[in-house]
Amino acid sequence: MSSVPSAALSSRPAASSRAGDIRLSVEQASFAYSAGENAAPVFTLEATTFQARQREIVAVLGRNASGKSTLLKLIAGVLEPLSGRVQLDGFETSRLEARIRAQRIAMVQQESQLLYPMRAWEFVLQGRHPYQRGLRFETTADIAIAQNALRQVGAADLSDRLLQEISGGEKQRVILARALAQQPLLLLLDEPTLHLDIGAQVDLLHGLRQLADANRYTVIVVTHELNLAAEFADQVVLLHGGKCLRVGSPAAVLQKDLLEHVFEAPLEVETGPMGRPRITIRGQEPLP
Amino acid sequence: MRPLTVERLLWTCALLAAILFVVVVIALKLGAVPVSLYGLGKDLIRVALHRSSELSSDYRFIVFDLRLPRIILGILVGASLSVAGASFQALLRNPLADPYVLGVSSGAAVGAIVALIVAPHLPVGASIAALLTPFGAFLGAAATIAAVYFLGQREGQIDSGTLLLAGIISASFLSALITGLMATISSSSYRGMAFWLMGDLSTPLPPSLRWVFGAGFLLAAGAIYTTASDLNLLLAGEREAMHLGVEVTRVKLVVYACASILTGLAVSVSGSIGYVGLLVPHVMRLLFGSDYRLLLPTAALGGAIAVVVADTLARTVVAPTELPVGAMTAMAGAPLFIYLLRRRAA
């Protein structure tokens, strides 16, 4: 991990001095899942508040069933908050028309199942769907945007390959390219590093950092990788049992006591050379 | 990158339309009574020039009053079943979905038979009563696909194996219902049990229904076609489609209703012809890829070709006796179904 901070990382301005207004505003947003209309809720996400600007990467951390995916769905606008608001540039995301929402918000999910063989370029062109009308024949502009998206994620050479035949890391890049082809303001990623080896994980986050800077995306990434979040995120949102425990810079949120409480594991937190925290597992004392 | 262009769509359809035309000419020629290709060509030109009075009366009766209406019926039924099959495959995310396999055809047959039984007791004119059969078939088809859809779910998710099983069980239950209903009505004016269970094209379309069938097919298939590019995304899953800007609920409702209409129309005039909706879209996918903007029109034309060919074989292989066309399609379709099922399991 120590080799990660690179020119692109160190040359960018600090989060606090970044220009631009708040792009995403999550205000006291909550949600409750229940089995039936009058049944008691099975799971509740309590009021959560944070803001994100353009070029910012926000990492959402927490254990399984802590409410991470629910928060992501609220931001994506596919769930309507029970109370509070989720606004993107002043518009409530859950009230946007589906097409408009897909022009502004792109979601990268864990691998989709494909029923029929499909080439990478076909998959990436799907990202142009929200911009097309009628029978939606792709224009030369759509093709150029899709090619550019593949180039931006370093997957131009995968264009003609079948998705069924490429590696997990390569597929993740193609999925990301489809999201870029949507030309969104907000890029949401649901555990994008799952099933990736450490090299591919670092590549992906590094790429996201550069994309956020180059394309002015606001990036929200749900992840289990504490160290990747610590290294690449501008803000961290820590959820636990449906509650938002803390929001802030990685150094402010990733603290030993808090993490040990949330993850119920013996952890050590050190500060790296860039002032970013590093989390390691405290080994058990050998038995006498 | 080579995305689908309008030119490629039109050329592909033109090629299939040309094949369909050749198939139709051959189907007009073949049959228990031989007709020479030369004479047929001359007669077709005479009809095209509005000089049909010059036709010899025997030819005219056999070719233009018996064979041609049957071929046109085959074209409409084949296109309807094939488009319905391709639609159900996208809706249920299952390449094995087909109106016959899912029991939708049997549901439509039950609806049609119930309409036939009830219609004489209703205070409506004959022309309205004739419309009740396709309408009953549509209701039967829609109710069956709704039932199969809900029975095919496991923990809120469509499960491929459960869905097929639900369809097959529904089909068997509804077939029993058809047998029961047919036993209770003795009138010889009703088409026989074999018609509703197996399907054939020997009964010509009543003139009052020709326009209903033609317009219904164009409207329903056209409505499905407007959602073609949404269906491409629905194949990847509803959540993904939603994130890419598809109004999932609206698209599903349109396709569900229109595919039921197509099945209902086809079954009400030809009984349950099986496996067309499975076989044809599968072959078209192999030939032209799985883009629904190209798949839907090629499936329509391919379905027309397949049913006309199957019906011509059904008329000629054991001539002068005729086989039901449903027997021909099942002989080709059932082995393909097994093959696809086993390949998926592997």
Image (tube, coloured by chain):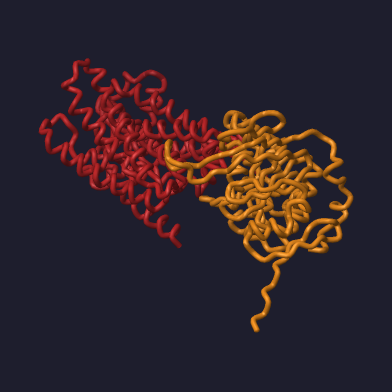
Chain colours: A orange, B red
Q: Position of residue A38 (x, y in %)?
A: 42, 36
Residue sitting at x 31%, y 44%: B313
Left or right: B153 in relation to A67: left
The C terminus of chain B, quarter of image: bottom left
In this view, which residue lies farthest toward the bottom? A288
**Is residue A278 visible to us here?**
yes
Q: Is residue B312 visible?
A: no
Q: Of residues A24 and B12, which is closer to you in this image?
A: A24
Query: Looking at the picture, how far across and down is residue B275, in whole percent?
Result: 35, 46
Asked which quadrant contains residue A40, the reply is top left
Residue pictured at 49% horizontal, 34% vertical: B249
- Position above or below: A117 against B31: below
B175 vs B17, nearest the viewer: B175
User: Residue B55, how many percent across, how many down?
Assistant: 31, 23
Quarter of the N terminus of chain B within the rendering: top right
**Where A288 sits versus A215, above or below?**
below
Residue A186 rendering spot, x and y as whole percentages: 70, 39
> Which residue is located at x 78 percent, y 56 percent?
A231
State the count of labels.
0
The residue closer to the viewer here, B16 or A154, is: A154
